[in-house]
Image (spheres, coloured by chain):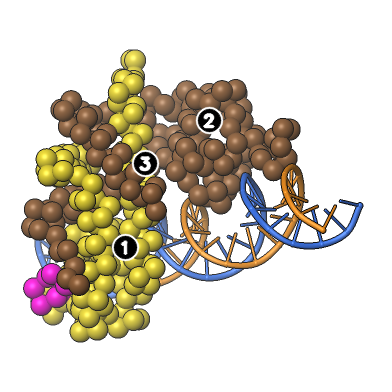
Chain colours: A yellow, B brown, C blue, D orange
Amino acid sequence: MEPRWLTDEQQDTWRALVGLILRLPSALDTQMRRDAGISHFDYLVLSTLSTAPERTMRMSELAAEAEASLPRLSQVVAKLEKQDWVRRAPDPADGRYTLAALTDTGWEKVVATAPGHVDEVQRLVFDVLPKAQQRELKEISRRVTRVIEGD
Amino acid sequence: MEPRWLTDEQQDTWRALVGLILRLPSALDTQMRRDAGISHFDYLVLSTLSTAPERTMRMSELAAEAEASLPRLSQVVAKLEKQDWVRRAPDPADGRYTLAALTDTGWEKVVATAPGHVDEVQRLVFDVLPKAQQRELKEISRRVTRVIEGD
DNA sequence: TAGCTTCAGTTAAAGGTTTAACTCAGAGAG
DNA sequence: CTCTCTGAGTTAAACCTTTAACTGAAGCTA
């Protein structure tokens, strides 16, 4: 069974994509650590919570939205809890779930941090891509993540 | 100075892209660990070396091609050296540089591992993207990484 | 030649992530 | 009612990555 080797064209594309997935995360991290003292993933957790009803979500829901494993989320939320940005409590409706809630100081942290983050996203991504490519990027990302989810 | 908030459309795109950059690396890692017992980054280092003249490169060159920091590369190469896949020696032409060379067993490891890797790349990326989107993906990735490099 | 500087590379420590084992609440079967 | 099963969440250990400090080779200046 002969493997399906990449064409030269595909190799170029693949190398470019690998460059992207290796560099973009660390670029986002750099900006967040420099300007807000937290990692990009910390911010993702806080900002995801900030958009939820009551600014509260179950840990497992939050993990799914933030594309994280539950152990990873658990560690990070423990850290955020020490800063008093998040608080955890068992779900009164079903003790198996844990509700994570954004505190007022956590909300303030998001508000203070969001502008620098969106500026960076604009600068790194949207400023350099014409509208048509922005549309393609959404479609491409969804198609690839859909396959991965299917596994 | 009002921050340049993302439009709804841009938010969708951004979320999709974040999903991609969080999931694709771990999907690649999963396949490599399962089928070859090494990380995707280990493979990237080995395969990059395998394409170099004499299968030999300076550490700093290799770090640049593999988009890695030098400390990270140094650790990984130390590990690969223990498996006798790579050997290091000072550059005779200039003792400040270190040459990393792929051994014969290292070459065999790449040959044995490549088919499973390319199959996975085809499956996750190229199989789900029409040619036009493949072209866009290359262009998009290059534009974004170019900005990041510029920093 | 001595001494300063620069830069490649390694090493050590701190922090983050993953994997596997464990705890515990609720649901269902007998 | 009790036993078992399932699945959410935490914890511990191994591993990996980053940051900062260190080593050592070559070049430059006096």
Tell me if label 2 and label 1 are in contact, CB under 8 Å: no
Query: Would residue A27 be found to the left or right of residue A138 on screen?
Result: right
Residue at point 34% right, 81% down? Answer: A83
Quickly name the residue at label 2. B49
Residue B75 placement (x, y as % from top left): 57, 48
**Residue furthest to the top:** A1
A42 with respect to B70 (left or right): left
Q: Quadrant of residue B15?
A: bottom left
The chain under label 2 reads B
* Mark 1 lies on residue: A40
The residue at the point 16 percent across, 28 percent down is: B132
Asked whether residue B83 appears in the rendered view, the answer is no
**Chain identifier of the residue bearing label 3 in the image:** A
Asked if marks 2 and 1 fall on the same chain, the answer is no
Residue bearing mark 3: A19
Using the image as rendered, state which of residue B9 and residue A46 is in the foreground: B9
Instruction: State the extent of the magenta-drawn residues as a range.
Output: A49-57
Rendered position, A49 above or below B143: below
CA gap, disc 1 and disc 3: 18 Å
Query: Label 2: how many residues lie within 10 Å, few (<14), some (14-19) or many (20+)?
Result: many
For the residues tagged 1 and 3, is the chain the same? yes
Disc 1 marks a residue whose amino acid type is His
Residue A67, given in percent of the width and then of the height, sits at: 24, 56
